[in-house]
């Protein structure tokens, strides 16, 4: 369907036009699920960071998921991932805090990562304002957001907090240094996320080639992954990022981090955002929610 639509690739469009494209896909995420409360606010600080808070109920001391949207660090925002966040909040029972980090190329690496960490730290330190339990906080995201989620987990470990309990990594990009995996060779052309687009995203995000080798840019290059929170890694069979996500899961496992990996057969890169037309997208949200419930010790019924 996407191929039949034709037109130039995102990397062939002016930046402002490329950023409009994801809005055309919002409805493919399915209906806008009602949640108990949705609140958009701006976190104070040296960099003011907008967030959108989704509450599955009005109870206090709920667990929380700090969520970072995908989009290659260049496109997408709170609106484009609204459906995913609503689904995760309702199915998991978590307060979902979606973070509108600064985008490249206006803001190069490590701006997005620093924003993601700052937002996570602020929410943890002001848990009472958000009605959340500071001892039950997870980070998560899809694609570039999956990268940011595990980078934030690394930053929290390296910088003395906040304490995180779980990381949800949905087809994360973990290695910007080469195109050497089998899935990149098999699915790097003709499967939505192609090699040229991946290179374009990387060129927008990183100021130098050397930055791509830093662990906070390419998490797979970290020399030590010990002490990170338990993780779930979701991949799609026909996604060029499949193998690097699964390889990173294996690195976590070797470091003693509990990891569950789920590959969805036949799926292309953004399938979770296509939950309105792809059954596997809905299934992945449910499975993600189940992993969050286990990882954050959520015992109340989903949606309550």
Image (cartoon, rainbow, N blue to C red):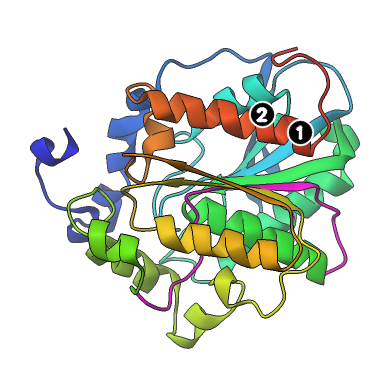
Q: Quadrant of residue 152?
A: bottom right
Taking the image as shown, residue 100 lies to the left or right of residue 237, namely right
186 over 69 or under it: above or below: below
Q: Position of residue 7 (x, y in %)?
A: 10, 45
Identify the residue at horizontal 73%, vertical 53% (top origin).
Answer: 258
Q: Is label 1 in a helix, a strand or a loop?
A: helix
**In the rendered image, which residue does mark 2 sit on?**
290
169 over 227 or under it: above or below: above
Q: Is residue 77 magenta?
A: no
Q: Which mark is on residue 39? A: none
Mark 1: few/some/many CA within 10 Å (<14, 14-19, 20+): few
Q: Is residue 165 magenta?
A: yes
Identify the residue at horizontal 55%, vertical 59% (top origin).
Answer: 147
Q: Position of residue 10 (x, y in %)?
A: 23, 53
Identify the residue at horizontal 74%, vertical 59% (top origin).
Answer: 257
Identify the residue at horizontal 81%, vertical 64% (top origin).
Answer: 227
Q: Position of residue 180 (x, y in %)?
A: 34, 74
**In the rendered image, which residue does mark 1 sit on?**
294
Taking the image as shown, residue 270 lies to the left or right of residue 156, namely left
Q: Quadrant of residue 302?
A: top right
What secondary structure prevails in the magenta region?
Answer: loop
Q: Is residue 62 visible?
A: yes
Q: Is residue 43 visible?
A: no
Query: Mark 1 near mark 2, Cβ–Cβ under 8 Å?
Result: yes
Q: Which residues are magenta?
A: 159-178
275 over 190 or under it: above or below: above
Q: CA distance from mark 1 to mark 2?
A: 6 Å
Mark 2: few/some/many CA within 10 Å (<14, 14-19, 20+): some
Front in this rendered view, residue 76 or 264: 264
Task: Report the quarter where the C terminus lies.
Answer: top right
Taking the image as shown, residue 44 lies to the left or right of residue 15, namely right
């Amino acid at each position: 369907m996407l191929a039949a639509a034709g037109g130039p690739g995102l990397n062939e469009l002016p930046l402002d036009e490329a950023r409009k494209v994801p809005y055309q896909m919002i409805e493919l995420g399915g209906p806008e699920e009602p949640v108990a409360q949705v609140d958009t606010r701006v976190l104070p600080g040296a960099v003011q960071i907008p967030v959108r808070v989704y509450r599955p109920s009005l109870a206090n001391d709920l667990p929380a998921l700090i969520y970072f949207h995908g989009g290659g660090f260049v496109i997408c925002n709170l609106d484009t991932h609204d459906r995913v966040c609503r689904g995760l909040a309702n199915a998991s029972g978590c307060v979902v805090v979606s973070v509108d980090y600064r985008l490249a190329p206006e803001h190069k690496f490590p701006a997005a990562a620093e924003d993601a960490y700052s937002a996570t730290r602020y929410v943890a330190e002001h848990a009472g304002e958000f009605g959340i339990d500071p001892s039950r906080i997870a980070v998560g995201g899809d694609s570039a957001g999956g990268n940011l989620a595990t980078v934030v987990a690394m930053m929290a470990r390296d910088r003395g907090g906040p304490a995180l309990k779980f990381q949800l990594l949905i087809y994360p990009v973990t290695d910007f240094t080469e195109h050497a995996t089998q899935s990149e060779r098999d699915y790097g052309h003709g499967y939505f996320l192609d090699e040229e687009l991946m290179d374009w995203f990387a060129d927008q995000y990183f100021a130098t080639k050397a930055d791509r080798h830093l662990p906070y840019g390419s998490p797979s290059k970290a020399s030590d992954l010990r002490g990170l929170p338990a993780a779930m890694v979701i991949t799609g069979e026909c996604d060029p990022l499949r193998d690097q996500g699964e390889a990173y899961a294996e690195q976590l496992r070797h470091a003693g981090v509990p990891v569950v990996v789920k590959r969805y057969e036949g799926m292309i890169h953004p399938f979770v955002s296509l939950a309105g037309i792809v059954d596997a997208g809905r299934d992945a949200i449910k499975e993600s929610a189940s992993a969050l419930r286990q990882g954050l010790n959520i015992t109340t019924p989903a949606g309550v």
